[in-house]
Amino acid sequence: MCSVLQVISNALGVWGLEIVLFNSREYQQLQIDPIHEKAFICNYKEHWFTVRKLGQQWFNLNSLLTGPELISDTYLALFLAQLQQEGYSIFVIRGSLPECEADQILRIMRVEQQQRPKLIGEDEAQRCTDRHHMTYRTRQESSPSCCAVGQFDPHSVTFTKEEQK
């Protein structure tokens, strides 16, 4: 993991960002509430994903999910603690993140998630099961090969215009 971490650290350094171990003594002494950060990189074995603040909302951008998962400010610390309990290494990204279109949009509009994204395997298995139970489907349509990896469902979130302050 050290060499991967060094590559990530060097890549972030190009943007003036640094990576700090979340549960390091150095970081914990700062006693910073996680909601005041901008992003976290989480790692377990060979899987890496980001938890990022866009606008005023947090999102779990785990590629194993069918789409981004909205995380409330209140749940963020619990979510990170749960990941640590599961053996994840968590790193805080410090510095000013580059602007992105999603950040600009989510500053004026808030997301309300109607349905939590599923793990890709769960979504895939459910679709396969549903298709296999439909007896009127053709053999080709009901084969397991029809179960492609899930994509982000735009109907699972709604945007609401944030009131100007």
Image: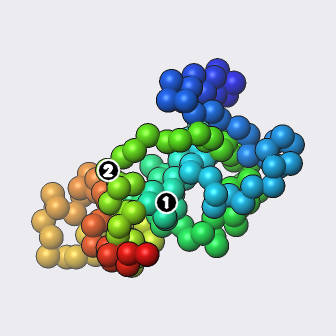
Disc 1, SS: strand
Mark 1 vs mark 2, foreground winner is 2
28 and 104: which is toward the camera:
104
Residue 69 percent location from the top left of the image: 47, 64
16 and 131: which is toward the camera:
16
Task: Name the residue carrying label 1.
Answer: 59
Task: Name the residue carrying label 2.
Answer: 101
**Gap in Å between the C-alphas at discs 1 and 2?**
15 Å
User: What residue lies at 40% left-to-right and 44% top-to-bottom?
Assistant: 99
Q: Report which quarter residue 1 is drawn in.
A: top right
Up-down relation of residue 55 to residue 165 (above or below): above
Q: How many other residues sit within 10 Å of disc 1, few (<14), some (14-19) or many (≥20)?
A: some
Compared across the picture, whether 76 is left or right of 154 comes to right
Q: Report which quarter residue 79 is drawn in.
A: bottom right
Q: How many other residues sit within 10 Å of disc 2, few (<14), some (14-19) or many (≥20)?
A: few
Up-down relation of residue 68 to residue 49 (above or below): below
Residue 126 percent location from the top left of the image: 37, 68
Disc 2, SS: helix
Disc 2 residue type (three-letter): Glu
